Image (cartoon, grey):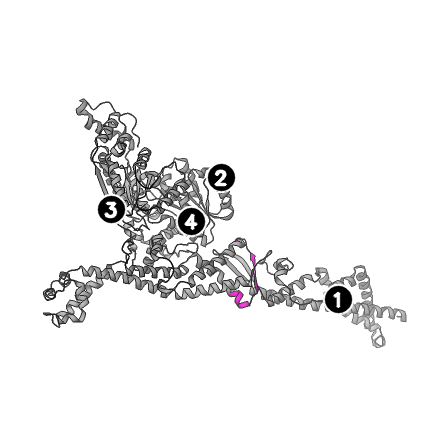
Amino acid sequence: MNREERRDLEALVTRVDAWITQARSIRSQRGTASDVVQESVEHLQRSTLALHRGGRIAWQVLPINPEADVRLGDLLAWSRMPKATSEDTRVLRFLAEELPTQVRAARSLLGLRRFLSSNRRKEGAFAAASHLADFRALSERGQLAPRLEALDVPFLRGGVDASRSLGQGLIPLETYLPELIGRPFFLDQRRVKELDVAVSRIRRARGQEASYRDAALKAGNGVREAEARKLLAEMPLDRLREATRDRLRTAPLANAGVTTVLDVLNLGGRITSLPGIGEKSAPQLLGAARTLWQTTFDETPARIDIRGRTDEATALLRALRAWDAARSLAGGSALLSRADELAPLADRARSTGATSMALYPTVHAPDPDMLRQDIRTVCDGAARLSTTAPRGRGGGNVWDDFASRPADYFSLLSELGINPEDEAKSTGGLPEEIVRAIRDLGLKTDHLKVASLRGYQSFAARFALVRRKVIIGDEMGLGKTVEALAALAHLSAVGKSHFLVICPAAVVTNWTREISAKSTLIAHRVHGPERDQAMRSWIRRGGIAVTTFETLARFQDRLSNVQDLACVVVDEAHYVKNPAAQRSRRTAELIERSPRAILLTGTPLENRIEEFASLVGYLQPGLLEDVAERNPHRFRRQVAPAYLRRNQEDVLDELPELVEVDEFVPLTAADRTAYRKAVAEGNFSAMRRSAIGEGRGSGKVQRLLEIVGEAEDNGRRVIVFSHFLDVLEQVADVLPGEVIGPLTGSVPAARRQDMVDDFSAARGGAVLVSQIQAGGVGLNIQAASVVVICEPQLKPTVEWQAVARAHRMGQLESVQVHRLLNEEGVDQRIRQILQRKKALFDDFARRSATAESAPEAFDVSEAELAREIVAEERERLLSDQQGTPGPPPKERAGP
């Protein structure tokens, strides 16, 4: 090799050596950068928080602090470095690892080495030099030098303004943290700090809840003690003798002027100072008195009488209100649910010293406004809590609060254990294996706003969840609506989203109100002019769609496309007892498609066992067999897995007394004339109306005026029911004072609720006039404590439903029911026939394996009843006068 060749080789080796050095530098700095980026990614992953809402991950949260600024700066710097392709990586590895061997071999031909190298080494050096020459030529064609220059960019660490960079999408965070997708929503430091303070306050309140509860328990026992002392103050000394089987002499006590058991207790140790009381008899007398005291106390509930406002009852209400303010947080309330869900956000912000929080939405994320509202709810709730003191100090009249929500207060008493429920009755007598499964289910009440569910209500909700498709037939007034809502709230808490309520038009407004007032679920009114928009909103957002049996037909196709319909609730389910009816078929189709269904009805049977079998058949086909046998015992056994019913007297010890009075009214001359005319015409409807159709000349109207006048004197409000529209109009005309109505089937559902609201706000003596079918179903009319039924109804359940509108959970007054009955004629005949009906269905439902007292009946044709009564009355009234019973009744025997 000559000098020029050696010069060329030296230049080649120098050029390649520079590429090697540059490649090694690039690999080194990229390796260091990769390590830094990996460390930053791991740090950010550790900092990231999954924020839940409703049991599902709604947001991924990244705290923003100075450290996060640096780490995100690393990712930004890395993202700005030129990307190395796989070919780049291969070339860099070749340059850094393989080519140096060729360079060292080629150097054997340069300098003194060419003299010292062996022939074999020289041969290898010539081959290496040739290889380097080929590589240079290839590299120059492949633009190796510019590519190395492009890759040779230093990794410059430094912080960034994370909020701005993330908000503008400058950092491709999802490349490193796939859960952080899209543009984040930011919470600033002020809002996070406010949340932290609120969460801390709620946690402290939860820690203090036991003291609030103890204060309420003490106050409750104070009411019981006061009541027990009253009872002992009326208990004669003879009870001491009875308690000891006449082993004690009480004559010395009586001679000393001691007359009651309470007097003995009050004497205490001073009893030995009385003449005739010795050292032996004194402790025996005191022991017997204390035993009677304890027994009386144990059997005395803590009653709250709004008309008898004792100091003890006032103290109890204050304590309950204070406990409610604290325990609403510890009782599965919506506020506590939100606080528990948001607490990790506050904790992470505090532990990281975050200046803001970046929240990345998941598929389950609500609107950011909802998150802001959740934070506002927690902060406002914590602020209210801070003003609540133990033992109930606080603003506002506690009796007014009690009057506005008595059911909440009685629920609190039940939860305290002061007025415990009878567990056997609250479980409806279900088989033990079913009861065990229900007890094992923990009910999630995160989405409920009610202060506390009654034990029997929680049981009903869990029964529906465990058995999946059921009939809840609780007697009217026990809260079937909130039982169903509790089941839906639980399903929402475990991730379900779409629920459907089907009900009569009269109660759509009541359902939407109850959903909003007692849960955090969204109510969609799929009825009326906004129904199409409401349906679209429900499909998109989820929640509870409330529709009617009639409106259901309009949306049948769209409902079939809702894949995540979690539960169907059918209120007043006896509306679909006829399987041949179109509304029954549409409802049955939805029940079959939904994994869960809850049928609500206080009157599951009115006329036929077979009709109840249809309801059960929608839920669990084949459960009822051989219904035609009409064997009551077998029937009760078969329906047990799908049917739950409890009575008011079983589970509502605090319910005021129900006083039912049959008001037998003689026919006036005008009444008798009208009645005879109706009988002669064979007009059954006119016969039923005649005794109240003559205005002030009617005996029933005269008695009605007396009842309303007495109610006004006592500050009570009255609801008057009749089947007949003309009777209602006449009643509304003759009644003095404030009259609301008539509330009839033709009144739109929303207007019906407005009438009830107006009635509830009216003064004592106000009267709501209502058609019994319209006002007796679905509406809550606790404002009425006097109920008047103008004529006996042809179905017992119609009257029972109407009475239950007023005599229900939350009623504070005793309820008087006045049935206006004529002393002769059609009223008496209807009552006699209904008594026979009642005896028939009692055997099937008054005692059942799942409940007591389900109002159910057997075959009695109303048209046949009308013909029978008309014929008998024609014979009774007209045979003497005409000498013949007359022609058969005309076809005018409608109800």
User: With respect to residue 295, does 661 lie above or below?
Assistant: above
Q: Secondary structure at mark 4?
A: helix
Magenta residues, start to end = 347-366
Tell me the SS state at disc 1: helix
Under circle 3, the secondary element is: strand
Side (left or right) of 559 relative to 128: left
Q: Amino acid at mark 2?
A: Asp
Relative horizontal placement of residue 570, taking residue 244 as reference (left or right): right
Q: What amino acid type is highlighted by mark number 1?
A: Leu
| Marks 3 and 1, how far apart at CA | 103 Å
Res. 557 mark = 2
**Mark 3: amino acid:** Val
Q: Which residue is mark 1?
A: 95
Verify CB contact (< 8 Å) between mark 4 and mark 1: no
The 10 Å Cα crowd at callout 3, few under 14, some 14 to 19, many 20 or more, is: few
Question: Which residue is at 47% across, 51% downward?
Answer: 496
Among the two numbered marks 2 and 4 on one chain, the one whose residue lies closer to the N terminus: 4
Eye-nearest disc, 4 or 1:
4
Residue 139 occupies quadrant: bottom right
Q: Depth-wise, is mark 3 or mark 1 nearer the camera?
A: 3
Counting other residues with Cα less than 10 Å from the Cα at mark 1, is it few (<14), some (14-19), or many (20 or more)?
many
Query: Do labels 3 and 1 touch, CB within 8 Å?
Result: no
Label number found at residue 515: 4
The residue located at (48%, 65%) in the rendering is 197
Q: Of callouts 2 and 1, which one flags the residue occurring earlier in the amino acid sequence?
A: 1
**Mark 2 surroundings within 10 Å by alpha-carbon count, few (fewer than 14), some (14 through 19), many (20 or more):** few
Residue 712 lies in the magenta-colored region: no
